[in-house]
Image (spheres, rainbow, N blue to C red):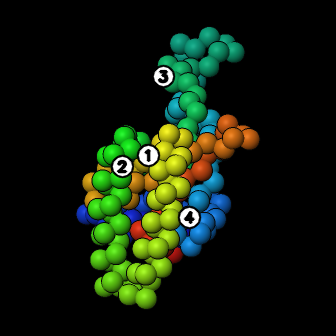
Amino acid sequence: MKIFKDILGYYKDELFSDAFPIKEVSDIVYEVTTKIVSRDLNVKVDIGANDSEEVEEGGEDTGVADAGVVKVNNLVDSHRLQVTNFDKKGYLTYLKGYMKEIEVYLAENNPDRVAAFKKGAQEYAKTIVGNFDKYTFYQGENLDAEGMVALSYFSEEDPNVQYFIFWKDGVRGEKY
């Protein structure tokens, strides 16, 4: 399995893995396809003991109240992503600083990539601005202010499919 981690910030949070379908978009971002799934919050523990004497015949003693089932995004749940908020001006300010940090990182680690990144990032930023209202913003579990903010939007065809956008040059894949 390959886990993709943030290259910036203090914590270098896990953001996604190859357990999810990943598509490379315009050589600048990854689009990860995720789903809304049901998650059972009830804890089921079988310690191998006999039923409690207080349980009536045919009854079941779970020892805990029913916690229920919730709907979650499988990527958000698996990688503990945290939702965050931006207005357009705030996001553009963040994005400008983030892109600058990625450029510095690339200049030190992959100088041949800097020009392509700058051009592609500027073009993709226009796409983001044009569709700003459809996005929800997520960060890694530690909400690292210097880390990546992923963009998310729902499929128009299937309300249970959600797409996440991650900057390709902002992540590093590690095999496990």
Look at the numbered disc 1 and give the secondary structure of its residue.
strand
Q: Residue at x 54, y 41 (%)?
A: 134
Look at the numbered disc 2 and give the secondary structure of its residue.
helix
Residue at mark 1: 137
Q: Residues within 10 Å of mark 4 (few under 14, many from 20)?
A: many
Q: Residue at x 69, y 15 (%)?
A: 58
- Distance between the Cα atoms at labels 4 and 3? 42 Å
Task: Tell me how many marks there are.
Answer: 4
Residue at mark 3: 64
Look at the numbered disc 3 and give the secondary structure of its residue.
loop
Q: Residues within 10 Å of mark 3 (few under 14, many from 20)?
A: few
Would you say 7 lies left or right of 79 here? left
Question: Which mark lies nearer to you, 4 or 3?
Answer: 4
**x and y percent of residue 83 in the render?**
41, 42
Would you say 61 lies left or right of 107 here? right
Residue at mark 4: 30
Q: Residue at x 51, y 62 (%)?
A: 124
